[in-house]
Image (cartoon, rainbow, N blue to C red):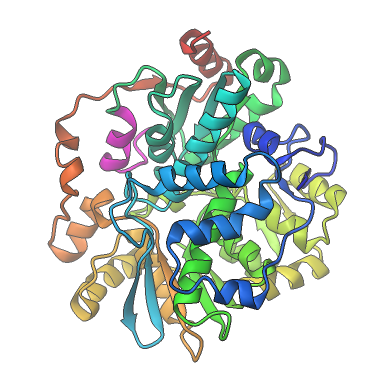
């Protein structure tokens, strides 16, 4: 299995090098040269299997010779052993033909754990084999950072630096990043918004001297390994609802487009998916793009669903790559235009995107109303991101089962949930002392040189 850049000018890599590299040297994102497919019989055989067994079947064709069969099975087992539900990603029925896929049973209570726990295991195994050390730098709108810190804390061969927008994540999200005591993990509160943090990370990857000096690696959703791990729960949930013998649709609350792009990969692999619905909050650039055919950046408005407060959705570049028929030059041209504020998508490409994805937008008031209503009508306490998804998902109900992805536990966003329901959602017992743990925060202005100095001063040589 070989991996190519969405911009067409970077070296072709193996899975291991793709995982450890993150962002391609031409600024693009890596995707598989070809997407493996599974037969209907292979998909049907997943019925009744454990999450780990399905994960092995789905991901094994993508990893090539990076790990042996036995090694990969062991890494998967370790990755999900700490999850709080035996099904890992259980389905809950909300209404006729509407289901909730609970993705918050991992150690940091968010869907990012499915990818990050596995990435941590794969990094550790690959680095132990090579004897190398890497510096992981990532940007987060809330959940990626805590999941990355949890996955890599205390590992010998990795230093982790997570940039998050100061004052724009929930208190639980912040404390999950700032309370770990291990010396190899660092949370940096950056003045500005998530898009600024994400731009700084990309600038570091494009500074090739710095990249080599600190052996930079990335675990944001730009990392193909992240997307790959998220493909699995599309298969487990769809098979539970009758796939491959019938189609299943998905609604995904998303800001950076990685989670819903994983659904696109599942569909290309042969999973019979009906609709893939993009659910956005008021920072609705993805919905606007699909409606207008123009990707035009706007200012970021802070909301009660902060993980979606994004205007530059990195993984949308992967969607563009396939919409343009894998034309790297066309994608590179669009990304150059994005630096100037936005770009117009060609008619053929926007038609391809609209055939692959539907979309919707939810206001702040409707998000809160959905949290209130779902508790009263369904007995389900939703986090605000999940509420965005549920609101849009119910608008797309029909004869095909609809699965809305519950991306985080309501306790990660207690203020928004309490305001909507009067209930302060408690943290799970294993995290009950989170508010009592001392925090360790580094504050920085959004300056590339200043942050590079922090990283160089703190890495373990």
Residue 20 in the figure: left or right of residue 326: left
Give the image location of residue 222, x and y in percent: 61, 43
Residue 433 in the figure: left or right of residue 33: left
Q: As rendered, which of 397 and 448 lies closer to the eye?
A: 397
Counting every numbered tag in the picture gives 0
Residue located farthest toward the bottom when viewing the structure as drawn: 399
Give the image location of residue 159, x and y in percent: 48, 21
State the image quarter where residue 82 is shown. top left
Magenta segment: 165-178
Q: In the rendered view, would you say 296 is above or below 13?
A: below
State the image quarter where residue 354 is shown. bottom right
Q: In the rendered view, would you say 339 is above or below 208?
A: below
Q: Residue at x 52, y 57 (%)?
A: 55
State the image quarter where residue 105 is shown. bottom left
Magenta region includes residue 164 = no
Residue 79 appearing in the image: yes
Magenta region includes residue 170 = yes
Give the image location of residue 71, x and y in percent: 55, 41
Q: In the rendered view, would you say 119 is above or below 213?
A: below
Q: Residue at x 20, y 24 (%)?
A: 438
Residue 196 appearing in the image: no
Q: Residue at x 44, y 42 (%)?
A: 117
Give the image location of residue 88, x and y in percent: 37, 58
Q: As rendered, which of 335 and 162 lies closer to the eye?
A: 162
Q: Residue at x 45, y 82 (%)?
A: 395
Q: As rendered, which of 440 and 153 lies closer to the eye?
A: 153
């Amino acid at each position: 299995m070989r991996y190519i850049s969405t911009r067409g000018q970077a070296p072709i890599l193996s899975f291991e090098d793709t995982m450890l590299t993150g962002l391609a040297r031409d600024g693009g994102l890596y995707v598989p040269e070809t997407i493996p497919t599974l037969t209907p019989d292979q998909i049907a055989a997943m019925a009744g299997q454990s999450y780990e067994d399905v994960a092995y079947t789905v991901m094994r064709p993508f990893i090539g010779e990076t790990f042996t069969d036995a090694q990969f099975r062991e890494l998967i087992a370790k990755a999900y052993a700490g999850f709080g539900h035996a099904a890992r990603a259980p389905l809950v029925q909300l209404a006729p033909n509407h289901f909730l896929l609970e993705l918050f049973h991992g150690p940091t209570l968010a869907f990012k754990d499915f990818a990050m726990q596995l990435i941590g295991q794969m990094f550790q195994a690959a680095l132990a084999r090579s004897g190398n050390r890497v510096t992981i730098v990532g940007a987060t709108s809330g959940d990626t950072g805590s999941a990355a810190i949890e996955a890599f804390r205390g590992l010998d061969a990795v230093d982790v630096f997570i940039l998050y927008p100061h004052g724009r994540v929930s208190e639980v999200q912040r404390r999950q990043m700032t309370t770990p005591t291990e010396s190899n993990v660092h949370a940096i509160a950056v003045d500005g918004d998530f898009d600024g943090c994400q731009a700084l990370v990309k600038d570091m990857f494009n500074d090739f001297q710095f990249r080599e000096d600190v052996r930079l690696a990335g675990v944001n959703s730009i990392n193909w390994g992240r997307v790959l791990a998220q493909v699995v729960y599309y298969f487990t949930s769809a098979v539970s609802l009758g796939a491959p013998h019938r189609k299943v649709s998905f609604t995904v609350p998303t800001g950076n487009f990685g989670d819903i792009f994983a659904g696109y990969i599942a569909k290309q692999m042969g999973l019979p998916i009906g609709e893939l619905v993009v659910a956005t909050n008021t920072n609705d650039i993805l919905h606007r793009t699909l409606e207008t055919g123009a990707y035009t950046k706007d200012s970021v408005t802070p909301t009660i669903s902060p993980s979606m407060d994004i205007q530059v959705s990195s993984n949308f570049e992967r969607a563009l790559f396939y919409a343009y028929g894998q034309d790297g030059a066309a994608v590179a041209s669009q990304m150059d235009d994005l630096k100037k504020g936005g770009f117009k998508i060609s008619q053929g490409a926007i038609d391809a995107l609209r055939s692959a994805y539907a979309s919707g937008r939810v206001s702040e008031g409707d998000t809160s109303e959905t949290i209130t209503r779902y508790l009263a009508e369904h007995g389900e306490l939703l986090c605000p991101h999940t509420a965005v998804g549920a609101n849009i998902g119910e608008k797309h109900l029909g004869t095909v089962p609809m699965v809305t992805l519950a991306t985080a536990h309501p306790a990660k966003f207690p203020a928004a949930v309490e305001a909507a329901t009067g209930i302060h959602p408690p943290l799970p017992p294993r995290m009950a002392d989170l508010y009592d743990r001392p925090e360790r925060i580094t504050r920085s202005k959004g300056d590339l040189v200043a942050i590079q100095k922090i990283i160089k001063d703190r890495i373990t040589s």
